[in-house]
Each structure stands twice: as structure tokens, then as C-alpha cells.
Amino acid sequence: MTLFCKSIFILPGLFVALSLRSEWTEIRILSSDAENLTVSYVPLADVAADPRTATIGEGDAMLNYSGRDVRARIVSSMGQERLDAIWPLVGVQQRAMDGTNRRLNRTVLQMPRGQALARGDYLPDFALFDDRGEIVFSRTLRGKPVILTFIFTRCTVENMCPMTTGRMVELAQAIEERELGPAHHLLVSFDPDYDTPGNLRLFSVTTGADPVNVRFLTGTKSVIDDLTRAFGIEIVAEDGTLNHTIATLLTDNHGRIVLRQDGGRWSMDAILNELNRNR
């Protein structure tokens, strides 16, 4: 039986007051005030301009983007500005990131329709942002087992994303206690419209995830679409709802998939047993 998560949420921009104005732009954040949730910034197109002030979300304040160039959606209302979403700009690393994700796209295009990565296959090349605003290249994960699954933070169905997140947090603790690690624990969001690095940071803190061993990943929609296609994750957005399936995978130290479990009720014991068998 295929399990689906169904969550209701307001699509971005569906209901926007006429007084609001929103635009994407590239800016340089000069300083950040985490206590008051504000930043000082200038447009990248005119770094000599007078600094402007905008409010930010709690998760973005945790990341402290001071001195960094970012792409943000600036929402203006009644003379006040808010950075509604912040994505890091990575300069010279962007070429490496784009090249890696082009390889992912080629891998997906070569896969027969209906086929998904399974036991014996290798983790494909990809590059995403984590909940610290840093780039994660899949090739750098080799040398340790990888436990990877998919979620989105706005999911409200208890036996799907919330349960998967809680189980991943518990799994990281169990692996450490049984000395079966180290391992990479990755939760990839397929809702990049909302799940920016900052929102994932706040979610990580809220769920009590180990900030060293458990990482939440996000990226552009095209890259997320390629990843979910590669792993056979089905996602249907319809009438303000998001339905999806779940797959949880374990790789060995070389990036080869040694275990795949489909559905929200995946077994921690199966992963622990596999890690114990191969240590």
C-alpha cells in the first residue's frame, strides 16, 4: 500500500493584501541583530547606497548572515520591509554546485520512467544547502554511511513527516549510544518555497535534532524535483494540499544503497542491524 502525507497550507502569494509589495533581489547583509530580528543591508547592484533595515525570521537570525551576499524576497508594507526568504549566494562555488546538479539531471534523464534508485545503486551527485546555509556536496559524504529521507516542515500528518523527523533524531542518538557511527543523517525537504535554510534551522532547533549529526537539506525546485524523481518520491500539489510518499535509505561508506524502506513507518532497527552487521 502506498502511503501518502496530506497537509493543507496556503500557497505562497495566494492571499496577499493589496498593501503588500514583494520582489526578489540580491543584497549584501551588513549586520544582523538576532535579538530584535533585524538586519541592515544594501542592494548588490549599489553597495554604496545608504543601508536599509528589514525584519527577518527567527531561523534566519540564528544563521547570522552578516557580511554575506544573499538572494531574498523583500516584502514591503506601510514603509516597513521584511526579508521573507533568504538564500545564500555562494560566489565561485556556484559553478561547482551547478555542475554537480547538472550531473544529477543527466542521471535522472537516463533513468527509465517508473524506475527509482534501489538497493545496490549508488547515491547520485547532488549539491544542496543545509540548515546552516552551507553547501553539501554528496561526494563529500563518502567515507561514512548515509541515512537519507524526505520531509517538509509544514507537514501536519503525525505518522508521516513529524514521525520521520522524530525517528531520525532518535536514530542518530541510538547510533551514537551503540557506537555504530559516525554516520550522516540527512532530511531533504521537497518544499523549497517555504523550507529555506533559515526555516530549516528553526525546525531543527524545535525538533531537538543534533546540529552536528542531523542535517536538513534544501535547494532549488529543479534540483529537488530531480532528487525526488531519482528516489521515486511521488508528490502531488492539489487544491492547497501536498500529498507525498516517503522513502528512507541507508548507504555504505562508498555511497552504495544497502537498504531502502518505503512508507512513513520505516524501521530504525533495520538500519541499526545493517550498520552493526557492516561495522
Image: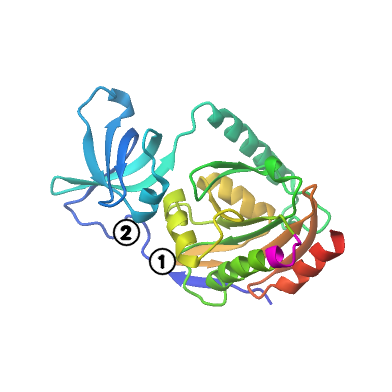
Viewer can see residue 194:
no
The image quadrant where one finds the C terminus is bottom right
Q: In which quarter of the image is residue 240?
A: bottom left
Query: Do tag 2 and tag 1 residues touch (Cβ < 8 Å)?
Result: yes
Q: Look at the image and give the residue range highlighted in magenta.
A: 175-180
Magenta-drawn stretch contains 150:
no
The image quadrant where one finds the N terminus is bottom right
Is the residue marked by circle 2 packed among few (<14), some (14-19), or many (20+) residues within 10 Å?
Answer: few
- Position of 132 with respect to 279 (left or right) is left
Q: Which mark is residue 14?
A: 2
| Residue found at the far left of this picture | 78
CA gap between label 2 and label 1 equals 9 Å
Q: Residue 240 carries which label?
A: 1
| Image coords of residue 131 (percent x, y) | 50, 51
| Image coords of residue 244 (percent x, y) | 57, 66
- Position of 271 with respect to 86 (left or right) is right
